[in-house]
Every structure is written in structure tokens, then in C-alpha cells.
Image: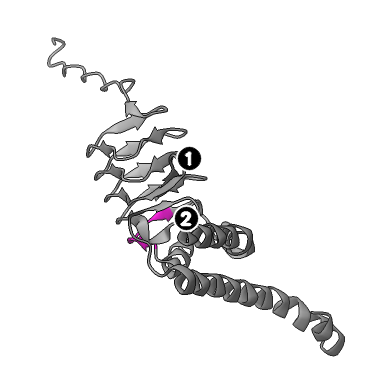
Amino acid sequence: MSFLAARTQAWVTIVATPLIALGFSVITVVVVAAMKWALLGRYRPRVEALWSGFVRRTEFMTGIYEATAVPVLLQTLTGTPMLAPMMRLFGVHVGRRVLLDTTYLTEFDLVRIADDVAVGAHVSLQTHLFEDRVMKMGLVRLDEGSSVGARGIVLYGATLAAYADLAPLSLVMKGEFIPPGTRWIGIPSRPDTTIVAPPASEPVSVGGRR
């Protein structure tokens, strides 16, 4: 930028600076996505020993993603329509009209987000766990119209069915199925029994009588 500023008028530098910064940020994300495909290809459900080469590669890729792609651009795009196309570069399946307000994804191809889904701020769609020195990976599915509240966690093998709702700060355990149209809350999550049906409307009075 100093090279440009020394050779052009001030207004040119002012206009060009954000465009150049954005361009380099997009290039950085594309390079990191290309690294993912080169090192790991497409993620699939699997079980690997902690000391395996695959685990070393995927942990390295996670570190690069979180230390480079997220701060340089993806974090800025959270909650906007532009984040979904960026995440698709990494292999995340994101439907239409999705609110994606988080970058806490690792095994990208194992995340399946359908149409009209809302994923709140700092939600973790956790597609792997380490259990007894073994890395286990599986799908996380968010079906049409479902939602995950801020800082919620969905573990691998779990599914939120259509129009299911996970409250903020709640956890869906691995392999669980959240039924359609229900609301769950807590750690671990359970059906929300605090929802009270609205009171019945008062009968209409006719001629001063009920």
C-alpha cells in the first residue's frame, strides 16, 4: 500500500485499500480451501487411531483454518449471506436462505445444513470426538427449518429434524435424534417443558350476555 500511496493521489489509495485487502483475504481463503482438498480430500465418517497420519493431517488443517481463514475473512462474514458460499468451498453442504453465524466447523463435508436453517453465534457443529485415543467422526444434520441457539453444540451422528429448535447453551449428544417441531434445552438437551400454550380466547359476548 505504501508503494501505491507514493505514486497515486490520496483518493486512489483510499478507494483501493479496502478492495486490495478484500482481494487478498478472498485469495487466502481459497488457498486454505485448496489445501484442505489436497491434504484430506472429502471427509467421510470414519474411526482413526490418535497417532495415525490422518489425524495429524486433519488437526494441522484445522489449525490452518482457524488461524488463517477464519480471522482474515470468515469471521467478518458470519451472519451474512456471504459466509455460506465461502464454506461451500471447504465442502460444507449449506442450503438456501440459511443464517450461518458461526465458523466452528472442522470436518466440513460431514456438516449437512438444509434450507431455511438458523445456526446461531458461536455454535459448534462438532463432527468428531476423541474417545480412548481414538478419533471418531460422523455426520451432523440440520434438517429444513431447524435452528440452533447461540453457543449450542451438536455432536457427531446427531440430527435436528425439520423445524426442531435447540435452545442457546444446549448440547445434543452424539447419535441423538431431535424430533420434528420440538424444542430442546439443557446439557444434555431434553424436551423443553416450560413452553405454555396461550390461554383460550374469551367467548364473544352477544347482547350483553356470554
Q: Position of residue 205 (x, y in %)?
A: 16, 16
Q: Which mark is residue 60?
A: none
Residue furthest to the top in view is 209
Locate the C terminus and report the quarter of the image it occupies.
Answer: top left
User: Is residue 172 located in the magenta-colored stretch of the structure?
Assistant: no
Taking the spot 25% from the left edge, 22% from the top edge, the residue there is 197
Magenta stretch mostly in which secondary structure?
loop
- State which tag comes first along the sequence, 1 or 2: 2
The kind of secondary structure element at disc 2 is loop
State which region is magenta: 92-99
Give the amino acid at mark 1.
Ala
Q: Quadrant of residue 43?
A: bottom left
Residue found 53% across the figure and 57% down from its top: 59
User: Where's the N terminus, which quadrant?
Assistant: bottom right
Q: Is residue 96 magenta?
A: yes
Label 1, label 2: how far apart the Cα atoms are: 18 Å
Crowd class of label 2 (few under 14; some 14 to 19; many from 20; radius 10 Å): many
Q: What residue sits right under mark 1 in the picture? A: 150
Q: Kindly report which numbered mark, 1 or 2, lies closer to the viewer in this rendering.
A: 2
Front residue of 158/130: it is 130
Residue 106: give its label.
Answer: 2
